[in-house]
Amino acid sequence: MNTSRGHLRFIVDGRESFQEQRKHEIRAELLHKRAHELHAANFLRRAWLRWQIEREAARRASAEEPSDRALFVTPH
């Protein structure tokens, strides 16, 4: 298979990979935004905050979900 520049490969799990990557980015943003609150919290409050962050990251990632007809390719 020629893998030189200009060739594209379809990604079978592109949609799932995109969503996981986006969820990871959102989670990092939320953790950064709430870092002070997490640092000051006790164990139970920290667990509750992390649960909220995970829930919000999942909600936002699914809201930005690409079309069912989207194709994902890699430039390699």
Image (cartoon, rainbow, N blue to C red):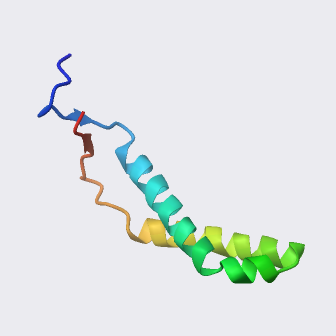
Q: How many marks?
A: 0
Q: Nearer the viewer, residue 66 or 17?
A: 17
Tell me what residue is drawn at x 18 percent, y 35 percent. 8
Which image quarter: residue 65? Answer: bottom left
User: Which residue is drawn at the image coordinates 56% and 67% (left, top)?
Assistant: 27
Residue 52: horizontal and vertical position, in percent?
Answer: 67, 75
Residue occupying image coordinates x 80% and y 74% = 46
**Image location of residue 1, percent across then percent down:** 20, 16
Image-based side of 47 in relation to 66, left or right: right
- The answer to which of 69 and 37 lies nearer the viewer is 37
Write the residue at 62% across / 72% down: 31
- In the rendered structure, the answer to whether residue 20 lies left or right of residue 12 reads right
**Seen in the image, is 8 located left or right of residue 19?**
left
In-front residue for pair 71/22 = 22
Against 25, is 4 above or below?
above
Instruction: Residue 29 in the image: state x and y as whole percent.
Output: 53, 72
Instruction: Examine the rendered structure and indicate whether residue 20 appears above or below residue 35.
Output: above
Quadrant (top left/top right/bottom left/bottom right) for the C terminus: top left
Q: Position of residue 68 (x, y in %)?
A: 30, 55
Q: Quadrant of residue 43?
A: bottom right
Image check: 13 left or right of 27? left
